[in-house]
Amino acid sequence: MAIRNSPEKYGLLPDGDLVAAASDEPEDHGPELTPGEAIRTVAFWVISFTHAFAAVVFLTLMIHAIPMIEGKGYTVVQASFVVTTFTVVGGIFQFVGGVIGDRVSKKWGIFCFVSLQALGVLGMALVDGYPALLAAAVIFGVGFGGRVPLLIAIRGDYFGRGKFATIFGLSTIPMGVVQVVGPIGAGFMYDRLGSYTLAFLILFGVNMFAATIILLIRPPKHAGIL
């Protein structure tokens, strides 16, 4: 009952903007691309794969974190507390990421948060001391939580609100493929090498690649432009 579909229906503008004064000139609320137009842009694919590469790290860590930490000599309770730490911190920073996205460039915000996520997963893979593991979990949680709202909202900025749900749904197709590969690949490497280190080093590299390519996108100037 608390959800509203369109701010204009209530005499408002998106993101808390004030209603503009009456004018004969039509207001520009940004791009409004159809799904077909969106998928013909470079921005659509870069955003989709940035989201996919960032999300696969979280999913893989959620599946393999406890056995990985147990392999360092800690109990299942200690390992579970590490997972709880980055989950709780991530939940808090989803709100923080949304606030930051309203104040700075979303792609730079994504770059910073995805980079923090990468540093967090690298730390959890390499460090051995329990306080260091918890510190890495906090860093990972900050990065994971902060990038979630920004990666979703940036699609509205680049492609408009009119077909947002369809465009977002289409972008989850490459995300789904990548997220299947990550956890299975990490498990395969562990079975062959007896360690998660290489798998998570690869995930660190994938994360940093995702953080970098998001900086290359430019908003479409008109329908169909790459």
Image (tube, rainbow, N blue to C red):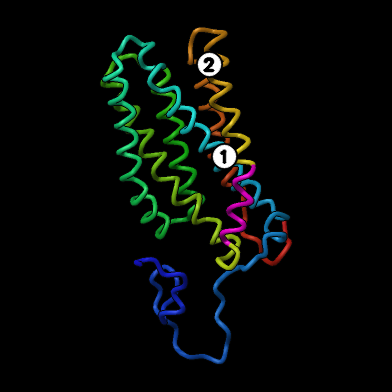
Tell me what residue is drawn at x 55 percent, y 43 percent: 51
Tell me what residue is drawn at x 30 percent, y 13 percent: 74
Tell me what residue is drawn at x 44 percent, y 51 percent: 149
Q: Earlier in the sequence, mark 1 or mark 2?
A: 1
Q: Residues within 10 Å of mark 2 (few under 14, many from 20)?
A: some
Residue that mark 1 sits on: 52
User: Image quarter for residue 186?
Assistant: top right
- The answer to whether residue 54 is magenta is no
Q: Position of residue 208 (x, y in %)?
A: 53, 33
Q: Where residue 44 is drawn, which disc sits there?
A: none
User: Image quarter for residue 40?
Assistant: bottom right
- Judged from this view, the residue extending furthest toward the front is 1
User: In the displayed structure, would residue 174 be above or below residue 16?
Assistant: above
Closer to us: 73 or 176: 176
User: Image quarter for residue 75?
Assistant: top left
User: In the displayed structure, would residue 18 be above or below residue 190?
Assistant: below
Number of numbered discs on residues: 2
Q: Which residues are magenta?
A: 164-173
Q: Quote the CA–CA distance across marks 1 and 2.
A: 20 Å
What residue type is disc 2 on?
Leu
Q: Main structural element of the magenta stretch: helix, strand or loop?
A: helix
Looking at the rendered image, the quarter that the C terminus falls into is bottom right
Looking at the rendered image, the quarter that the N terminus falls into is bottom left
What residue type is disc 1 on?
Ala
Q: Residues within 10 Å of mark 1 (few under 14, many from 20)?
A: many
Q: Is residue 186 left or right of residue 101?
A: right
Residue that mark 2 sits on: 198
Closer to us: 103 or 162: 162
User: In the displayed structure, would residue 211 be above or below residue 150?
Assistant: above
User: In the displayed structure, would residue 121 be above or below residue 214?
Assistant: above
